[in-house]
């Protein structure tokens, strides 16, 4: 199915596919994570092959496993550093606690291989009368080899694989991408997202000028 939704939670309008659990928009990031049923962890485990006399470890490769049910998510390198879902959701704590954002949608796609969290920024604007443009902060956390962590501002409400793909394919300077070769640095990303907010403000000015 195109939506590829495994689990999700949402505030506001029901998604087009009708899936997920409806929640209040005043949930904390941790509460949103639980409602979206993505409060699980991943870990890397050795891979083996049958040698002549015994099982041998496959060098340089490990299995990325979802610990809640043993689901194999992917095969990654030994230097690949997973980012736990809890750390991804904790990224929103300062913004939500300050009242600048509210958790809006979150979930798991492709049997856990991609987890996302979306917070709605309390700074919407109108291009025309009754034509409101919303702003969201999106955190895409893939548990998949060769896929980057992506944090960005977007006007797209993510509720499925299609809308996530649209958001990630949008203007590149609205956020930042990080590979899994380094430990995730939330402070660095927040500094970068400060620039992204300025870019969204420019988008607002341009949209209203063109209108």
Image (cartoon, rainbow, N blue to C red):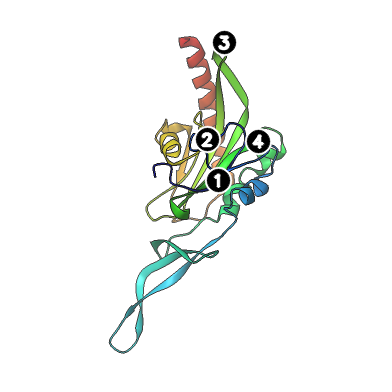
Label 3 belongs to which residue? 129
Marked residue nearer the N-terminal end (2 or 3): 2
Q: Is the C-beta separation of discs 1 and 2 under 8 Å? A: yes
Q: Residue at x 56, y 25 (%)?
A: 134
Q: Is the C-beta separation of discs 2 and 3 under 8 Å? A: no
Place residue 117 in its image quadrant.
Answer: top right
Q: CA distance from mark 4 to mark 1?
A: 16 Å
Element at badge 2? loop
Q: Is the C-beta separation of discs 4 and 1 under 8 Å? A: no
Label 2 belongs to which residue? 15
> Where residue 72 sits in the image (x, y, percent)?
43, 63
Of 16 and 92, nearer the camera is 16
Would you call the spot at circle 1 few (<14 residues within 10 Å), some (14-19), or many (20 or more)?
A: many
The disc label shown at residue 8, or none: 1
The disc label shown at residue 102, or none: 4
Q: Is residue 17 left or right of residue 40?
A: left
Q: CA distance from mark 2 to mark 4?
A: 17 Å
Marked residue nearer the N-terminal end (4 or 1): 1
């Amino acid at each position: 199915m195109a939506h590829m939704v495994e689990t999700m939670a949402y505030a506001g309008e029901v998604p087009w596919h009708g899936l997920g659990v409806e929640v209040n928009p005043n949930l904390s990031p941790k509460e949103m994570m639980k409602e979206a049923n993505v409060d699980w962890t991943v870990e890397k485990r050795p891979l083996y092959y049958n040698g002549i006399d015994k099982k041998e470890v496959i060098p340089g490769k490990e299995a990325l496993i979802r610990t809640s049910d043993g689901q194999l998510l992917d095969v990654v390198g030994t230097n690949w550093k997973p980012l736990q879902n809890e750390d991804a959701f904790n990224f929103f704590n300062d913004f939500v606690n300050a009242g600048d954002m509210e958790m809006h949608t979150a979930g798991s796609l492709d049997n856990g291989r991609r987890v996302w969290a979306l917070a709605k920024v309390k700074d919407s604007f109108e291009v025309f009368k009754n034509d409101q443009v919303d702003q969201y902060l999106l955190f895409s956390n893939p548990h998949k080899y060769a896929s980057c962590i992506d944090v960005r501002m977007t006007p797209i409400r993510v509720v499925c694989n299609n809308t996530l793909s649209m958001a990630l394919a949008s203007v590149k300077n609205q956020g930042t991408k990080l590979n899994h070769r380094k430990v995730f640095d939330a402070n660095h990303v927040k500094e970068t997202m400060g620039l992204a907010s300025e870019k969204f403000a420019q988008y607002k000015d341009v949209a209203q000028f063109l209108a």
